[in-house]
Amino acid sequence: MKFDLLIKNGHVIDPLSGYDGKGDVGIKDGKVAKLGLNLPASSADSVIDVDGFIVMPGVIDSHVHVSSPERWVGFSMMAQAGVVTAVDFGGPIESTLEGLKRFGCGMNIAGLHTVTPGVNTRTADPSFEELDEIAERALAGGALGLKIVGGHHPSTPEATARIIEVANKKGCYVAFHVGTTRTGSNIEGFFEAIELAGKNRLHIAHVNSYCRGLTKTPAQEALDAVEALKKSRHLVSESYLGTINGTSAHCVDGLPSSHVTRNCLKMRGFEPTEKGMGEAILKGWALIQVLRGGKIELVTGQEGYDIWKSADTKTGVSFPVNDTAAMHILASAKMPDGEFVVDAISTDGGAIPRNVQLERGSALVKLGALTWPELVKKLTYNPARMFGFTHKGSVSEGFDGDVTVVDPVSGKPYLAVSRGQIIMIDGIVVGKGGFLLTTEKGLKKAEELGIPAEAAELDKSLFYTR
């Protein structure tokens, strides 16, 4: 057999087959054609020797934000970080698809469509009928499902439960940044989310974001979250390893529009007002997101304040609010059978500069909190199962030719391959275009837009089968 690409001499880790050792991966026609030892270089058109590096299935980031023009730069930021597949949690889906088509860097992308009170619902308490219409339009538009942005823009608890129920009845995906008009983006909101889901399926986003010490210590909140998830195994979840969050700095009538932003200001003793935001920027607590040199950077102090004011406060902002002890607990907690309590490690990044899952994940390996096979499983195989990406998450024969190669010492990605095509090598992004992962209803929209696509198998996903 003649391979299109042969990745040789790496330490291959494949969660599905259990392969963990020296090996070669041969790719042909966009699929893994062979995983084995001593595959001859003469059998391939292109050969890359990765001796000393770890070779894993292509990294799948199960929670990113690249869905608005100012965030389309996130595609290249993800590719640089070794990400091959990602699920956008920002919406609207129309913007996600436009960004994929124009700036996709050869990646595989799925997108959720946000349900936001006052933006695409008339009130914070939309009816079943209104939510059903939103879901239908989202799926026809190419979305994999819905995202509830409760922590930022809350709906009533009753409406939130309706959104979850509508998605479950349609058999699509639904994720929740917890919080309603009754609770907030904190551990109490997390417990409420489990209650509102009932027996329905739900993805609870970035669990670490609710363990910031607003009611107990962050570590105790993380332990409480672990115990709750152990009792709710029909739910899926992810957490990330970045110390900064990401939210909106936009203020309306003297108040931050996002409730998360208000919480972050109060955490350091600033008033949850526009004035308090300005003071937080000047004193270095609030970090304004700004596009520079093809990526998003964080700026604070007087420079950050001036950027924020000149944009009429319409910028992104980050705060260093994520506790490392809580993050490590959530990343490593296991069930008695060895499965992880929190299914995946994500970034909640993309355009937000915290695409550190390989770097920080490798540090957890050095600390002994995870092994390399466990980290690879949380970055590849588990998220593939969560979303029904049944041809991803493995470098076994017949799976998509998605590969990430990483330096085990630094955690720095060296190579990213998507469907047999190199999209990043040694930090240089070379991929073009992109591939949409959607539902059967979304394939027509992808065809209209000229975006290659395939339907995820949600009926076989961990989301619907566990």
Image: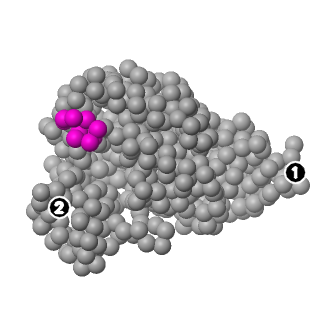
Give the percent coordinates (x, y) of residue 372.
55, 52
Q: Residue at x 48, y 36 (%)?
A: 142
Looking at the rendered image, the quarter that the N terminus falls into is top right
Magenta span: predominant SS is loop
Please give the residue where the numbered disc 2 appears in the rendered image. Answer: 265
Above or below, comparing residue 92 to residue 126 in the picture: below
Viewed as shown, does residue 144 lie left or right of 26?
A: left
Viewed as shown, does residue 202 lie left or right of 187?
A: right
Of residues 366 and 202, which is closer to you in this image? 202
Give the percent coordinates (x, y) of residue 429.
60, 63
Above or below, comparing residue 45 to residue 464 in the picture: below
Above or below, comparing residue 233 to residue 365 in the picture: above
Of residues 439 and 49, which is closer to you in this image? 439
Disc 1 is placed on an element classified as helix
Please give the residue where the numbered disc 1 appears in the rendered image. Answer: 43
Of residues 313 and 51, which is closer to you in this image? 313
Q: Which of disc 1 and disc 2 is earlier in sequence? A: 1
Residue 239: image tag: none
From this viewpoint, is residue 407 visible? no
Range drawn in magenta: 116-124
Disc 2 is placed on an element classified as helix
Q: Tell me which amino acid carries mark 2.
A: Leu
Q: Tell me which amino acid carries mark 1.
A: Ser
Closer to the eye: label 2 or 1: 2
Residue most toward the bottom? 302
Above or below, comparing residue 199 to residue 61 in the picture: above
